[in-house]
Each structure stands twice: as C-alpha cells, then as structure tokens.
C-alpha cells in the first residue's frame, strides 16, 4: 500500500487514467496533469474526480511537484517536458505506467514481447496458444489494455496466471525494475527517431529489462539480426535464439517445411506446410510464439493446432474487398519503413502503394531497393509526403493525393486485374487520424463506397 503518498500522473490517455485509478486503490493521493483540454479528457476528468482524483490541465504546472513522492508517466507523454526535467532535477523519481503496474505482478508470471514490428501479432498468437492449452492467461500492455487495468481487475488471477504483455519503447522508458520471466525481442529497425535521439538509444531502451533478468528467466532473441542477437551478452537469463536462416543447436529454426526446436533438451518438430504463413505476416512471429509456448510446457501437437486455427488481427495486411480483380489491403498498422518492407516481402502481386502520414524520423531511402520489383506506383498522403518523395529519389512514379478517399479512387484507376492496392503508410496516423485503427477504418469505408459506386454504374 502507498500509505497516502502524494503522486502525480502525467497524461490522461488510457494508461494514465488506469494508473491513476490503481494508485488511488493502493492508498495514494493522486493528481493527474493533462496538457490538452478536449471532450475526451474532460469526460475522463469527470470520471476521475468522482473517485477523489484531482485533474489539472495545462503545460506549465511546476507547482504540482510540491511534496510529490514520485511521478507516473503515460506512454504517449514525451520525457523532455519541462515539468519532467524539473521533477528529476528535484530528485523526484519519474517512472512509466508499465514500471508502476508491474510492481503488483509476480515477475515469474510476466511474459513480455517487444520489437519494431510484429509485437501485436506475436502477443496475440502467444495468448491464443496458452489459452488453448489450459494455462490461465491475460493479455495487455501496448496491445490495448493497460497493465494497470489488468492489476485492478484481475489481482487474484495475477498471482497464478500468465500476463502476456506487448511492450513498446515508450513504455520501457523510465523502467527501473521491470523484469519479465520471458522477454522476447523480435526485431529492431529505425523507428520513433522523432522521440529517441538515435538508433543506439532506441536499442538500449528495448534491451533495458535484459540485465535485470536472472538464470531462471528466458530471453528469446532474433538470431538473424545482429542488432538483436548481440544483446544476449547483457543478460544472465537463458538465451534462446530463433532463426529463419540458420539451423541452431539450441533454439527455434526452420528446416524444409517444419519448425524445429530444441529447448530444455527436448527436440520438437512442427510441420507448417498448411499454416498459411502470410496470416502471421512474418515467420519470426510464429517462431517466437512457439518458443514461448514450449518454455511454458505446451505440447507440440497443441501448438500446431493453435497455429492452424489462428485468425489474423485487423489492419495488418487485411483483405478488405476485391473489386474487378483488384485486391484492396489494409496494412494501416505498418507505421514504419521496416513494416512496409515486411508487407512487400509477403505479397506476390504487383502493388499500388499508399504511403504517408506523420513522419517518425526514419529513412525512407531504405525502401528503394525493396519497392522497385513489386510496386508499380506510390500514392503519397499527409505531412511526410514531400520527404518520402525526396528520399525515394524518383525510384518509381509517385503522385500526391489530398485525402485517403482520393487515394483509393486514384489507385483503382491506375490498377489492373491481379494488382493489389495496399495502404501501408510507413508513418504514424496522427497528422489526420486518431490512430492507425481509425485510418484503417476510413480506408475500408472508402473501399466499400468505391465498390458501391462501381456496382451502381454497372446496373444503369
């Protein structure tokens, strides 16, 4: 219990709200600072005040630091805010919502999955496998349900079940004790450089839990990426590698049409010739989830059944409609260049690619060689469109569109039967949309409207 400690929460997103409620339940005196006053934050303020939590709006509120024991930060709040710098200069500890919530969960029950791409698919797939095996499991973190909410709603369960958490670099910042029993790093590529000072800093944040883990814990790392595999030397945990390219003495790898594994000296073979690998977007996601399941004692037969039954999540290479032989695919979750590359690797048809949004600081020129063979035309949207055009350097025909609605119609006009029109932005959605989900829903709605318009013309 927090014994009436005075705590400041900064940020009134989902995580901030749930952290504030958890703090209150644990006996703290809670104040929430939110920078933006709008309909959503005003509604949350009303709900929190009914629970005895004060909510304050505004950016210059250093007076709130008086007598604070510590500060909890929502993931979306940048750590260079003056009030945060002031707090740290005063010796007030600043921690993330993930760090705070995990204090109430036994470390041996936490499975955490991170990486630049594939986190959500791997987290959800792992959850499905463990649930099918009869293991008590909850899912949360960056996938949608803040860990603070899991603690509030399922406290008894947390003592005996598994908590499968997707963790982002934003959540891992300002963690000091977060140390899962199983920690997985799928991949690392340039991302969020608008927030992190360099790729090295981004890599360091992703690796933060590794030195805290012990010999009874497991670190599952991508052997095929040196920037990930090299992190194994920073942990006392047992390192389990996965690889699509190498046969490993110990770990999880691919051989012919089989997933091979050797963990805990138990060789395993899982055929995947009927698995439809494209629904997982990347075989790495499968290998990592299989590794977690085997560590947790799930049988190979049950893992194979779970993989066969798996249904993909929306906005991740999701087929929306086919119109006159042209497939429209929603890959709105592709918010960085590596995700666009993964999409192109998994698709066989010629592509008309819709890109753009809010720039996250990555290098679009990285995609030049990847797009040349598969992409016919690029349609550019949003704040980043000029930089995308400039960095791709005329590698392909490119055309700017004023809206997603226009892009859908232009893409169809440029397409031929057998083509795929793919929304794979390589950017954040926050210049025009509230989230990648919102962007994907708008895309799907515009595709449906286009189909109706075409069918109406045919019926005349």
Image (cartoon, rainbow, N blue to C red):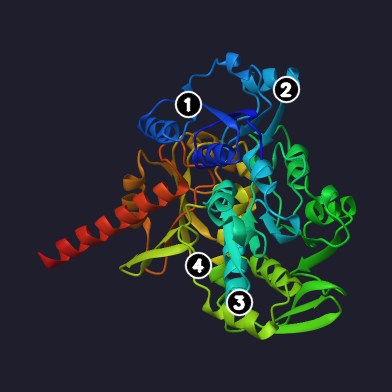
Q: Distance between the residues labelled 3 and 2?
A: 45 Å
Q: Nearest to the eye among marks 1 and 2: give it.
A: 1
Q: Can residue 456 be seen in this view?
A: yes
Q: Which residue does the numbered mark 1 point to in the structure image?
A: 55
Would you name the residue on which mark 2 appears? Answer: 88
Mark in front: 3 vs 2: 3
Residue that mark 3 sits on:
134
Which of pointers 2 and 4 lies earlier in the amino acid sequence? Answer: 2
Choose the circle earlier in sequence order: 3 or 4: 3
Q: Which of marks 3 and 4 is in front?
A: 3
Going from the N terminus, do you reach mark 4 or mark 1 first?
1
Query: Residue 70 vs residue 224: left or right?
Result: left
Residue at image point 58% right, 36% down: 74
- Which class describes the residues within 10 Å of circle 1: few (<14), some (14-19), or many (20+)? many
> Nearer the N terminus, badge 1 or badge 3?
1
Q: In this view, does 372 lie to the left or right of 55?
A: right
Q: Which residue is drawn at 45% across and 63% down?
A: 318
* Percent of width and height locating residue 397: 47, 47
Could you tell me residue 449's position as x and y percent? 25, 56
Helix, strand or loop at label 4? It is loop
């Amino acid at each position: 219990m927090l014994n009436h400690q005075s705590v400041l929460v900064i940020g009134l997103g989902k995580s901030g709200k749930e952290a504030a409620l958890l703090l209150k339940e644990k006996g703290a005196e809670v104040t929430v600072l939110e920078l933006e006053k709008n309909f959503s934050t005003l509604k949350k303020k009303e709900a929190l005040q009914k629970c005895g939590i004060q909510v304050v709006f505004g950016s210059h509120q250093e007076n709130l630091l008086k007598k604070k024991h510590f500060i909890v930060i929502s993931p979306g709040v940048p750590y260079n805010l003056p009030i945060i710098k002031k707090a740290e200069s005063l010796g007030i500890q600043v921690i993330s919502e993930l760090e705070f919530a995990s204090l109430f969960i036994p470390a041996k029950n936490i499975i955490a999955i991170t990486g630049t791409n594939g986190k959500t698919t791997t987290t959800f797939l792992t959850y499905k496998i463990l649930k099918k095996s009869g293991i008590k499991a909850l899912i949360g973190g960056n996938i949608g349900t803040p860990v603070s909410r899991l603690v509030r709603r399922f406290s008894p369960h947390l003592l005996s079940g598994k908590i499968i958490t997707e963790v982002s670099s934003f959540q891992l910042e300002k963690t000091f004790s977060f140390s899962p029993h199983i920690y997985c790093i799928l991949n690392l590529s340039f991302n969020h450089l608008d927030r992190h000072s360099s790729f090295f800093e981004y890599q360091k944040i992703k690796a933060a839990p590794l030195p805290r883990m012990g010999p009874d814990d497991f670190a599952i790392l991508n052997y095929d990426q040196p920037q990930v595999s090299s992190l194994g030397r920073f942990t006392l945990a047992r390192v389990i590698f996965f690889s699509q390219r190498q046969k490993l003495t110990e770990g999880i790898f691919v051989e012919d049409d089989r997933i091979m594994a050797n963990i805990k000296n138990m060789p395993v073979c899982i055929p995947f010739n009927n698995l439809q690998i494209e629904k997982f977007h990347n075989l790495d996601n499968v290998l990592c989830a299989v590794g977690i399941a085997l560590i947790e004692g799930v049988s190979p037969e049950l893992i194979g059944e779970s993989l066969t039954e798996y249904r993909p999540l929306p906005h991740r290479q999701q087929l929306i409609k086919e119109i006159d032989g042209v497939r429209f695919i929603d890959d709105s979750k592709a918010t960085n260049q590596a995700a666009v590359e993964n999409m192109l690797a998994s698709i066989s048809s010629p592509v008309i690619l819709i890109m753009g949004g809010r720039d996250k600081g990555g290098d679009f020129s990285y995609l030049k060689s990847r797009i040349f063979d598969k992409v016919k035309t690029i349609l550019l949207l949003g704040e980043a469109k000029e930089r995308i055009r400039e960095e791709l350097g005329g590698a392909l025909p490119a055309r700017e569109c004023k809206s997603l609605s226009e892009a859908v119609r232009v893409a169809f006009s440029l397409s031929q039967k057998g083509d795929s029109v793919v929304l794979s932005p390589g950017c954040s959605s926050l210049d025009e949309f509230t989230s990648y989900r919102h962007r994907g829903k708008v895309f799907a709605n515009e595709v449906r409207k286009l189909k109706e318009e075409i069918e109406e013309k045919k019926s005349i």
